[in-house]
Image: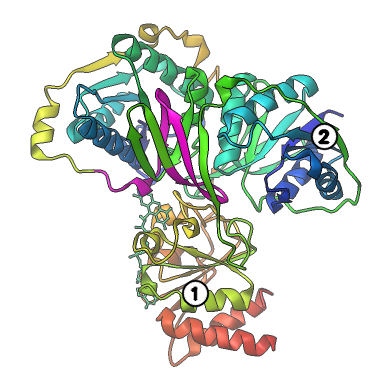
Amino acid sequence: MKYVPDATADRQFESDNTVDRVGVDGLLSELDEYAVEQALQLKEKAGDDTTVTALCVGPEKGLDAVRKALQMGADQGIHVIDDAIAGSDYVGTSLVLAKAVEKAGAEKKVDLVMCGMASTDASGGVLPAMLAERLGLPQVTYASVVETQGDQVRVKRDSDTATEVIGGTLPLVLSVTDQTGEARYPSFKGIMAAKKKPLETWSLSDIGVDAGEVGLDAAWTAVEETSARPPRTAGEIVKDEDGSGATALVDFLVSKKFI
Amino acid sequence: MSEVLVVVDHVDGAIRKPTYELLTLARRLGEASAVFFGSPDKGAEVAAKLGQFGAEKVYVVDDAQIKGYLVAPKAEALQQLVEKTSPAAVLFVSGYEGKEVAARLAIKVSSGLITDAVDIDASGLVTQSVFAGNYTVTGKVTKGTPLITVKPNSAPVEEVGAAGTVEEFAATISDGAKTAQIVAQQPRKATGRPELTEAAIVVSGGRGTGGNFEPIEGLADALGAAVGASRAAVDSGWMPHSFQVGQTGKVVSPQLYVANGISGAIQHRAGMQTSKTIVAVNKDEEAPMFELVDFGVVGDLHAVLPAATEEINKRKG
Ligand SMILES: Cc1cc2nc3c(=O)[nH]c(=O)nc-3n(C[C@H](O)[C@H](O)[C@H](O)COP(=O)(O)OP(=O)(O)OC[C@H]3O[C@@H](n4cnc5c(N)ncnc54)[C@H](O)[C@@H]3O)c2cc1C
């Protein structure tokens, strides 16, 4: 799960060209809420001792994202936080996530790594695939419907050019879209129960990642410049009166040579 | 000059336009070579087309043992090709598949990855448009082979009229890569209209259509445009998800985007804000969509669009 700046707020960059994650209010990426929801539904369906662990790599406030997942119903939380992680790109972040999943898996076998299809800030959509590659697992991504039977997983998805059914065998990495159905809101009971749930904080040394491998300086990509797009010059807006709107619209399209 | 690999986006040998755009960008960086995963029977035909748009060489990778699986085998084959050719960069179309193949490849060949580029210059500087188009970011891959996924409509298609030579590349695919299977696949029904992400003009409808997309489709046909929809229209079951424009739908960047009965939520804007010209029809003059427009009509789309369509057809006729 990712803690992201609120998309409806005025998102910005810092002077080192990293995303401002402090000055802008953040939250659990909405697309990751769908992943938490699907994980909870699978747990409810399994009805056994399945554990849902909420994992977030991020700054101090990233804990809010973990808390939100616990309030929704996740059983335990892990927050990976380390100053050296700041400024990591996809490659660095996927390393930290993979090592954290491996550490979690040393205690209890990890069958499924669930992710949102993309973050709502960078919206790259590549981390699930990177994580699968690092963990040596199959990836079943962009699911709009998730079905499991024993260790078999089937998902429906709308790919670039087709509607598909993808199948795989656990363990695997799964990413879900917002087509999987609305995520639940934490209930009052859920909020109270979350306070007692196990929550661990791990640093890079806890997961065995060298600080030199991650962070802004070690990133495999560098941002050279960020600039706010100049505001659009105010367009012409007309009120439709007795069909005048249609004529004005067509005149505009003709003037721009679209007709 | 070094080679630059362009991974061909196609359906059964029918090459999609964004691939030709990638060839334009590749030629700025070096010698463009295309990588075609498909049937070797189609090699010559595909190479002729790709050559026309600037591919000097076309690596044909037989997809017999690749096509039933999701992305991992393609990443494996590309790893072998990258190791053999040491390209200056590898370019992909920014779709689900292009991004995920690139993601796996980045880890395999220890290389940086930039997604959703809207431009690349001769020095390898990549431009992206982020935060729903509110910021422009430039950057570079600093480690390994630059892997870059590029949004459709980011570069012109340039005809150079050469012929690409075919070179078969035999990749070895491990069993470990064949673990996510494509169990069933149903190609999207052709609508007879242009492909949404490639279209020069997109006409979209939202909740304001009330479920009646006829005015949207009528205007789209008069303009030769693709039809799009907001998530509210898709969630209501009025249009299939494949028509959705936005953060969790298609990202479009046409010459002209016409938004009808769409309020302009940030998630919708994320999918269309880089359109060159934006037009909106909405009965609420306070709709945030009007902040983006070059031209707006405050009015009822059910009246404005049919009248505009009639007028366009008249002027064309
Ligand atoms: C994680 C997440 C991802 C999302 N992804 C997407 C996405 O990819 N794409 C997307 O579109 N949304 C997405 N959304 C949803 C988005 O937030 C909005 O809810 C959605 O875009 C609203 O659609 P709309 O503009 O059609 O509907 P509304 O916001 O309800 O707007 C309808 C508009 O129609 C106008 N109208 C009504 N009747 C008429 C008429 N007769 N003539 C003219 N105008 C009329 C109204 O004035 C209003 O402005 C996402 C949301 C979340 C949380």
In the rendered image, residue A254 lying in the magenta stretch gets the answer: no
Q: Circle 2: is it few (<14), some (14-19), or many (20+) Cα within 10 Å?
A: some
- Using the rendered view, name the quadrant where residue A184 is placed: top left
Q: Which quadrant holds the C terminus of chain A?
A: bottom right
* Residue to which mark 1 is pinned: B216
In the rendered image, residue A179 lying in the magenta stretch gets the answer: yes
Residue found at x 20% / y 33%:
A44
Secondary structure beneath dot 1 equals helix
How far from the left and from the top, in percent, is residue A8?
Answer: 35, 49
Subunit of label 1: B
Residue A207's disc is none
Residue stretch in magenta: A156-183
Identified by mark 2, the residue type is: Gly
How far from the left and from the top, in percent, is residue B28?
Answer: 80, 40
Of labels 2 and 1, the one closer to you: 1
Query: In this picture, is A134 found above or below A239?
Result: above
* Residue to which mark 2 is pinned: B30
